[in-house]
């Protein structure tokens, strides 16, 4: 049976993002006076127009973190995360593509950065009578660029054989306990990827047709499918029970997604779907 360090590695994403808030001392003074609390601090968001190109850069930067989080597994702390060896190439290519898109947007938009600052000031003045934004409130183009960046660092998982000195029995027990805890977290994460969207769908299907809250969007089904896809990729343990549950849920979702209208219109189909998926959800809870 493979050890955890043979099935996964650690990956750490270090991400720098420009701070696009500015302390608003005028608003701060008013609020402190009204609430009689001098400890309150008020920050004002810069680039409020969602269509401003600078916000497109920030949105794309957020996509880097989102993909990283969705395609790795929590480890023992808030630092590095587990990456299954089997998806290393897929992960690295996807991350590089996203980071390159951020770099391309920076190259495209920063030559006109000062213009985008002026557009934001105009937008704020148009939509807020008391707007006080000034060009000096914003970081310069050079400052903005210097504060944007990403770094990926890959590391092997620790193994007792890596230590250059003998560990006493207590240290060995602590080390082995940490490995078991990492495996437990990985297993729990795999189940949650499926269980959370599935529970939401089951709750929707439990409401009889025609009653308040019975209507559900296609995304309720799509989120379960997406959770299944992620669980397959991140199922490090390859636990037979989890693998079987993935298979059962996949079969059920294929059937029900092919009859979405019936789920909304037929009480019989809706009840059958609810009972089937609720049973699978209950089994998942038992595996946690």
Image: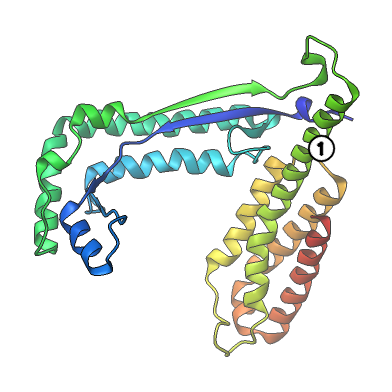
Circle 1 residue = 180
Left or right? Give the position of 89 relative to 52: right
Q: Position of residue 257 (x, y in %)?
A: 64, 66
Residue 230 visible in image: yes
Residue in front for this viewpoint, 247 or 82: 82
Q: Position of residue 163 (x, y in %)?
A: 78, 14
Vertical position of residue 39 compared to residue 161: above or below: below
Vertical position of residue 118 compared to residue 207: above or below: above
Q: Position of residue 157 (x, y in %)?
A: 71, 25
**Residue in the picture at 82% in, 35% down:** 177
Query: What is the quadrant of the C terminus in the image?
Result: bottom right
Label total for image: 1
Q: Position of residue 272 (x, y in %)?
A: 76, 78
**Quick one: SS at disc 1?**
helix
User: Which picture quadrant has residue 165?
Assistant: top right
Residue 236 visible in image: no
């Amino acid at each position: 049976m493979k050890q955890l360090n043979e099935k996964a590695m650690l990956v750490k994403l270090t991400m720098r993002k420009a701070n696009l808030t500015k302390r608003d001392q005028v608003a701060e003074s008013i609020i402190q006076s009204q609430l009689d609390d001098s400890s309150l601090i008020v920050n004002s968001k810069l680039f409020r127009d969602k269509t401003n190109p600078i916000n497109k850069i920030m949105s794309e930067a957020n996509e880097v973190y989102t993909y990283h989080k969705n395609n790795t597994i929590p480890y023992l702390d808030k630092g590095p995360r587990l990456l299954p060896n089997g998806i290393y190439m897929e992960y690295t290519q996807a991350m590089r593509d996203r980071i390159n898109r951020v770099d391309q947007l920076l190259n495209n938009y920063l030559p006109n950065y000062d213009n985008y600052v002026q557009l934001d000031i105009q937008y704020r003045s148009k939509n807020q009578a008391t707007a006080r934004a000034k060009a000096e409130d914003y970081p310069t183009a050079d400052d903005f660029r210097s504060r944007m960046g990403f770094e990926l660092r890959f590391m092997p998982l620790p193994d007792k054989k890596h230590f250059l000195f003998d560990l006493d029995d207590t240290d060995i027990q602590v080390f082995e306990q940490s490995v078991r805890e990492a495996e437990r977290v990985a297993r729990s994460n795999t189940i949650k990827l499926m269980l959370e969207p599935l529970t939401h769908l089951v709750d929707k299907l439990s409401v009889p047709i025609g009653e308040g809250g019975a209507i559900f969007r296609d995304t309720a089904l799509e989120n379960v499918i997406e959770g299944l896809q992620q669980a397959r990729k991140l199922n490090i343990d390859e636990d037979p029970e989890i693998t079987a549950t993935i298979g059962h849920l996949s079969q059920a979702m294929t059937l029900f997604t092919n009859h979405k209208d019936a789920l909304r219109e037929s009480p019989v189909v809706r009840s059958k779907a609810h009972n089937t998926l609720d049973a699978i959800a209950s089994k998942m809870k038992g595996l946690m």
